[in-house]
Amino acid sequence: QLGSMLYETLLQNAEVEIDGKKVKAFHRELVPEKTRKGYKMIGYASLNEALYHRIKTEDITSFAAHSTRQKPMIVPPKPWTSPRDGCYLWLKSDLMRFHGSKRQAEALNMADNTVLLDGLNVLGSVPWKINKRLVEVSQKCWEDNIPLGDIPSQTDIDVPDKPIKPEFVPEWPEKGTPAYDALLKEWEQYRDAFQRFSRKHRQNMDLRGLRCSAILKLDQAKKFQDFDSIFFPYNVDFRGRAYPI
C-alpha cells in the first residue's frame, strides 16, 4: 500500500518545465508482458517523451548531479573494518546489499568477516585509469548513432499498430462449423498480431533503458578521464559475490 501511494504521488506531483510550460514528468503506461499463461498488461511509470529527449540530447548535463551519489573515488577507499565502517570517506555504505533483510544483517554482524573484509579491501585498493582514446571512440559512436558494444542504437524499432481486440463472444458457435472456424481464425490472428506488437514495443523500451545507461557511463568516464588513477569501492550481495558499488 505504501508503494502504491508513493507511485501515485510520483505520477501526480512530479513535473518538468518543457517549452516554458510545466507538464507531468511521468505517466502511467500499460505494457504487454509475457507470462506463463500468455500476455498480461502491466502498468509502468513512463518518462515524459520531451523529458526523455532532453536527457538524451543534453547528455544529462543538467541531471548529472542527481544521477548517482556513489561514484568512483580519486583516493583509495577507507578500509572495511566492520559491516558499517569502511568504503567511502563520507557516504555511509553497507558491507552487504541487504535489500531490507534484518535477518541477513544480523547474521553478518554475528559472523567472523575477517577474510571477507580483507578481500574487499584488496579489490578496492586496485588503481584504475580511464582509457581516453576509448572514451573518444565511444562518444563518437554515440553522437553518430553507431551501435557498437555497449553503445545502443538511437533509432527506435518500427512498431506495428496495436491490434484491435475482437469483440467478446459469450457463447461460441458449435465446434467444426464455418462460424466457429472463422471466429477461431480471427482470435488467432489477433494473438499473433499482439505478440508482434508486444515484442517490438518491449525492444524499444529496453533500448531506452540502454541509452540512459550509456549516457550515464559516458558522462562518468569523461569526468574521471583526466585523473591518474581512480578506485572502485566494493561490497557483496547476499550470496557473497563482490561488486563495485
Image (tube, rainbow, N blue to C red):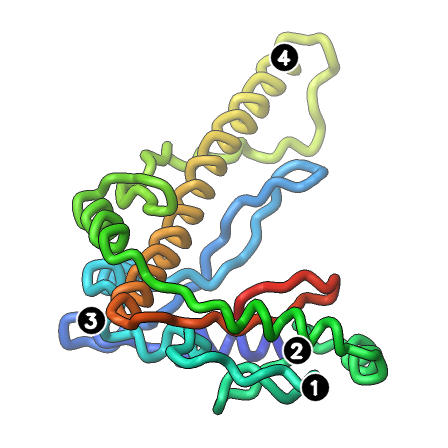
Circle count = 4
Mark 1 or 3, closer to the camera: 1
Which of the two labelled residues, at mark 2 and mark 1, occupies the earlier sequence position?
A: 1
Q: Amino acid at mark 3?
A: Ile
Disc 3 crowd rating (10 Å Cα; few below 14, some 14-19, many 20+) is some
Q: Amino acid at mark 4?
A: Asp
Q: Is residue 121 above or below residue 35?
A: below
**Residue pictured at 42% horizontal, 74% vertical:** 71
Disc 2 crowd rating (10 Å Cα; few below 14, some 14-19, many 20+) is many
Q: Nearer the viewer, residue 1 or 60?
A: 60
* Mark 2 touches mark 1? (CB < 8 Å): yes
Q: Which residue is mark 2?
A: 95
Disc 1 crowd rating (10 Å Cα; few below 14, some 14-19, many 20+) is some
- Residue 51 shows in the view: no
Q: Residue 119's image quarter? A: bottom right
Q: Amino acid at mark 1?
A: Ser
Q: Residue 153's image quarter? A: top left
How far apart in space, not on screen, are marks 4 and 3 (Cα)? 52 Å
Q: Which residue is mark 1?
A: 82
Disc 4 crowd rating (10 Å Cα; few below 14, some 14-19, many 20+) is few
Q: Is residue 138 above or below residue 234?
A: above
**Residue pictured at 61% horizontal, 35% vertical:** 168
Q: Amino acid at mark 2?
A: Leu
Q: Which residue is mark 4?
A: 181
Secondary structure of the residue carrying numbered label 3:
strand
In the image, 15: left or right of 73? left
Q: Which residue is mark 3?
A: 18
* Mark 4 touches mark 1? (CB < 8 Å): no
In the image, 50: left or right of 120? left
Percent position (x, y) of residue 17? 22, 76
How far apart in space, not on screen, are marks 1 and 3 (Cα)? 47 Å
Percent position (x, y) of residue 139? 22, 53
